[in-house]
């Protein structure tokens, strides 16, 4: 579902942004009527980044140093992976807490986006959602046999 949502969001944003560029280039008099597309694009891109965090982890696409990990014997590798997943889970949960605090602060500040005039809190609301999904993925790595380190990464595959 997450992949479908992100794909749909990417499709919509690509269409809107392409349309907006076309209007600015070929019908500049109408361009002010479509200023909202820039804000929608900003919100959409921020949401896409945070919602894709857990998918990137699941696919083994987060930054890592497998060269060092692969030099260890199997037993220490297992422990290092466990520590990495525990630290990732703890950090993700911490960022959920920080995200909730930031979202509440911004939402209560009354700050609104300039064109759409929606609460900027909606822009920040995705942070705790994204890090909750990331924490769930770290938890799943801990309790299941899922091993993102053993996956061969196909450079042509995109998340």
Image (cartoon, rainbow, N blue to C red):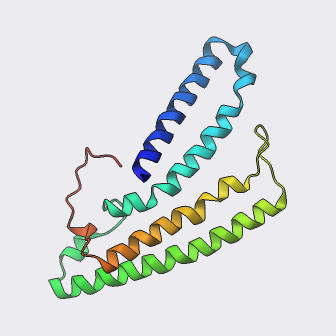
Q: Residue at x 56, y 51 (%)?
A: 47
Location of residue 126 by image quarter: bottom right
Q: How many marks?
A: 0
Question: Residue 108 placed where, x, y %?
Answer: 81, 63
Question: Residue 129 placed where, x, y %?
Answer: 56, 63
Q: Residue at x 31, y 59 (%)?
A: 59
110, above or below 22, in the image: below
Q: Residue at x 39, y 58 (%)?
A: 55
106, above or below 145, in the image: above
Seen as rendered, the residue at the extreme left is: 73
Q: Residue at x 65, y 19 (%)?
A: 24
In front here: 61 or 70?
61
Seen as rendered, the residue at the extreme right is: 110
Location of residue 97 by image quarter: bottom right
Left-right relation of 26 to 154: right
Left-right relation of 40 to 112: left
Left-right relation of 133 to 121: left
Residue 111 at least partly seen: yes
Question: Residue 32 placed where, x, y %?
Answer: 75, 23
Question: Residue 16 placed where, x, y %?
Answer: 57, 29
In front here: 65 or 36?
36
103, above or below 7, in the image: below
Residue 73 at least partly seen: no
């Amino acid at each position: 579902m997450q992949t479908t949502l992100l794909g749909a969001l990417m499709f919509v944003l690509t269409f809107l942004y392409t349309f907006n560029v076309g209007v600015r280039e070929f019908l500049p008099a109408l361009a002010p009527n479509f200023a909202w597309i820039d804000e929608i694009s900003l919100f959409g891109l921020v949401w896409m980044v945070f919602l894709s965090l857990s998918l990137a982890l699941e696919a083994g696409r987060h930054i890592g140093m497998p060269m060092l990990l692969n030099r260890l014997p199997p037993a220490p590798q297992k422990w290092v992976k466990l520590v990495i997943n525990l630290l990732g889970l703890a950090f993700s949960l911490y960022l959920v807490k920080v995200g909730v605090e930031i979202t509440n602060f911004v939402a209560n500040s009354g700050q609104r986006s300039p064109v759409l005039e929606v609460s900027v809190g909606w822009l920040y609301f995705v942070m705790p959602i994204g890090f909750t999904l990331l924490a769930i993925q770290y938890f799943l790595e801990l309790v299941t046999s899922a091993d993102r380190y053993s996956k061969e990464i196909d450079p042509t595959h995109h998340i």
